[in-house]
Amino acid sequence: MHQIGTFDLENYGDLLYPILWRRLVERKAKGEGVRHYSLLGGHAPQQAGFESYPLQDLFHAAESVPIPNLIMVGGGDLLRTDSHIVAAHYHTTHARRFGSLRRSIGIGNSFNYLLRKHLPRVDHAKFYTECFGRRRMKDCSLGPFLLDPHAFKSGTLISYLSCGVPHDFALAKRREVAQVLDRASFIYVRDEISANRLRGAGVRKEINVAPDLAVILSEQFDYASESRKGRQILSKFGVKEQQPVLCFQSNPYPGFREDEICKQLNQYRQKNGFEVALLPLGFCHHDDIFLKGLAAQSRGALKYIDVSSVFDMISVIAASDVFVGTSLHGNITAFSFGIPHLFGPLPVSKIDGFLSLVESPQELKLRSWTELNSKLEMVTGMDRAIFSKYSDTARARVHRVVDDLFEILR
């Protein structure tokens, strides 16, 4: 079985999918192996413990892959046709280091990029995305993760696993999107917003809707063990063991003011006796830089937790008494463990879609950072059994859909 996604980016959420899916396959389809593919391939970042292979290899090696060839696409916001935006995301991740540039666009293009970078009136980001597209997405005419079974040999099964649709498809693309997805063996999207966007594009194939796959995380990682490990990690960064912990994460975003966030966190810390742990989860979104800035502004009152392992990130969240972040999967990890949590005020539909599908209160999403203190008082006052009830229901719904998927793939 092959799984395709963005497993080559330093992003906590993207790296959870192959970890969780591989363990699910081991349990539900004994004897079946999983081979992972991403646009770049290579050893997975953040000590995730697996390899992925360049997506182009899957196209070119299709004739040598045994039938039936099972291809799982997902999860994440992968059902999209804006390949240039995907390429631009790789640019923000890889443009800082020559080694990363060389791997993503080739040595010749890398030298050209560096030469052009310092010339006036040259759009070096556009140059990178064009090179990346030609080198890494040349067989993906519709979108890098919208795969037509007709591009492979007869008998290939393509399914979509816990995918999101980040925006409506352009009118000119909808017919082709519908044709490709109607040929899929199975479609599982992670919220009703995504399902409606597919239906709006004309997709007639049955669309299965269930919460994001990551809600099952607490079945595969023991809460008590992870919490103990997380406390040990936190203590290395000066977090007092006897103090309750507020785990905070945020990507930089236009309109997000460091001084306001710092003020809100400090007020809560001083009033309620919490330690505040700043945990980076989205290095590809530069949240590590943003959080280091908050720690510096607080003069050490807010503790930056300098971990790079995805497994350490799971542990730190498990050790927290409350989680606040813009990361969807940071919040879903807290949700799965039954930890009170708040979504930061990012204007993205996937947060609203998740809250609606798991029937959590929409008040768990902040409208702005100015209401952080009042919302923290609300969420920490809620019975943790309520969060556990929501997560139990969400996990059961995921398993129903995944069991249907395995029935089709058998």
Image (cartoon, rainbow, N blue to C red):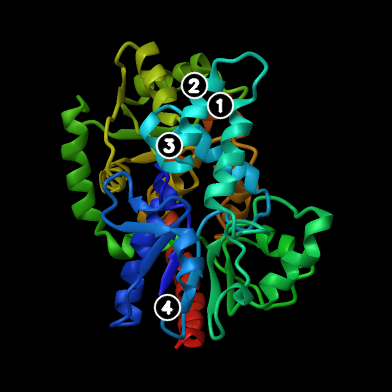
Q: Name the kind of residue labelled 4 in the image.
A: Val
Disc 2 secondary structure class: helix
Quadrant of the drawing holding the N terminus: bottom left
Q: Name the residue under label 2.
A: 261
Q: CA separation, marks 2 and 4?
A: 51 Å
- Which percent across, then down, holds residue 127? 61, 33
Q: CA separation, marks 2 and 3?
A: 41 Å
Q: Is residue 17 above or below residue 281?
A: below
Q: Name the kind of residue labelled 3 in the image.
A: Ile
Graded by Cα atoms within 10 Å as few (under 14), some (14 to 19) or many (20 or more), the crowding at tag 2 reads: some
Mark closest to the chain's N terminus, 2 or 3: 3
Please tell me which residue lies in front, 197 or 272.
197
Quarter where residue 313 is shown = top left
- Which percent across, then down, holds residue 149? 60, 76
Relative side of 7 to 350, left or right: left
- Which percent across, then down, holds residue 374? 52, 30
Mark closest to the chain's N terminus, 4 or 1: 4
Q: Name the kind of residue labelled 1 in the image.
A: Trp
Residue shown at the point (49%, 70%) measured from the top left: 72
Q: Which of marks 3 and 4 is in front?
A: 3
- Find residue 369 and name its label: 1
